[in-house]
Amino acid sequence: MKTPADQAASWLGQSMSHEHHDDEAVATHRYRAVFISDLHLGTPGCQATQLLSFLKASPCDHLYLVGDIIDGWQLRRRWYWPQAHNDVVQKLLRGARKGTRVVFVPGNHDEFARGFIGHQFGGIEVVDEAVHVTADGRRLWVTHGDYFDGVIQCAKWLAYVGDNLYEFTLKLNRYLNHLRARFGLPYWSLSAYLKHKVKKAVNFISDFEVAVAHEARRRGHQGVVCGHIHRAEMREIEGILYCNDGDWVESRTALVEHHDGRLELLHWGASTSGPARRAALQAVSA
Ligand SMILES: [Mn+2]
């Protein structure tokens, strides 16, 4: 017969040997679904450490990787793959192994994966697009969004030029934030600010959003989840719920579905350090 001490020891042993011990310790929520995109793993801009802490704190039943997960464009030019990027991939694979349904919808930066539609990588399903049904029965069309980007579709070389300019802005951004951190100022995204200003001026964002929402309606869905333009958003466009889960280069945002079907756009802690801040999830929209 087991003594209480034996039972405690075996319970402790079990919990200690649990592979997710660390993860469970920081997990504050379990979501029904999590949507993330535009991680751009393989580039210095990717905020992999922050992403990893978000993933650890946000276990879920369905995880959608909505494109531009691994940046094949940048990797082809210059190989960049630090340990933190490995850790993210391993976390995703482990999630799939542990019962999370992980769905990968490739984007334009990881279009190499579009050659493997219908296949699985370690339990991660690769699909061209998906339909997610929320707990309250809404059908959300899941697509990266680059099919709506006229510039990228019509002239790929132009997109490459824009990409180089973007890389430069991100470099400047890292430098500025390094200085800001020294002076104790919080993180601030220069590139997000610039792009917001510039693209707003040419109405790119609103054109994109309306085009995506219209296509979702044409297909008979109640909403759409996309990424691509690195601008997190959740709003209704002519009766269609338009959701953009943002990115992990600038804004560190994710779309989550709670178990009652409620959708929420999350912005992962604005600071890069401090356990209290790390744990802080700020809802930017309900
Ligand atoms: Mn993209």
Image: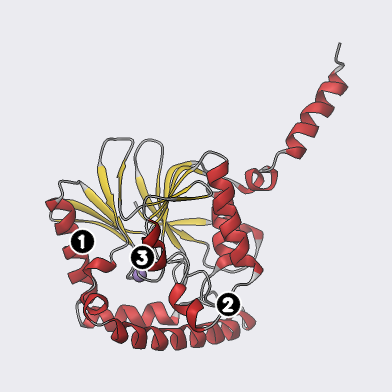
Give the residue type that dot 2 points to. Answer: Tyr
Q: Secondary structure at mark 2?
A: loop
**Relative side of 122 to 110, left or right:** right
Q: Quadrant of residue 215?
A: bottom left
Q: Secondary structure at mark 3?
A: loop
Q: Which residue is mark 2?
A: 80
Dividing the image into four equal quarters, which quarter contains ligand 1? bottom left
**Relative side of 24 to 259, left or right:** right
Q: Residue at x 41, y 67 (%)?
A: 112
Q: Which residue is mark 1?
A: 212
Residue 259, x across and y down, in percent: 41, 36
* Mark 3: C-beta under 8 Å from nearest atom of ligand 1: yes
Q: Nearer the N terminus, badge 3 or badge 1?
A: 3
Instruction: Specify the color scheme.
Output: secondary structure
Residue 168, x across and y down, in percent: 46, 88
Q: Residue at x 59, y 66 (%)?
A: 85
User: Whole-Å distance between the Cαs marked 2 and 1?
Assistant: 32 Å
Q: Secondary structure at mark 1?
A: helix
Give the residue type that dot 1 points to. Answer: Val
Q: Which residue is mark 3?
A: 107
User: Whole-Å distance between the Cαs marked 3 and 1?
Assistant: 15 Å
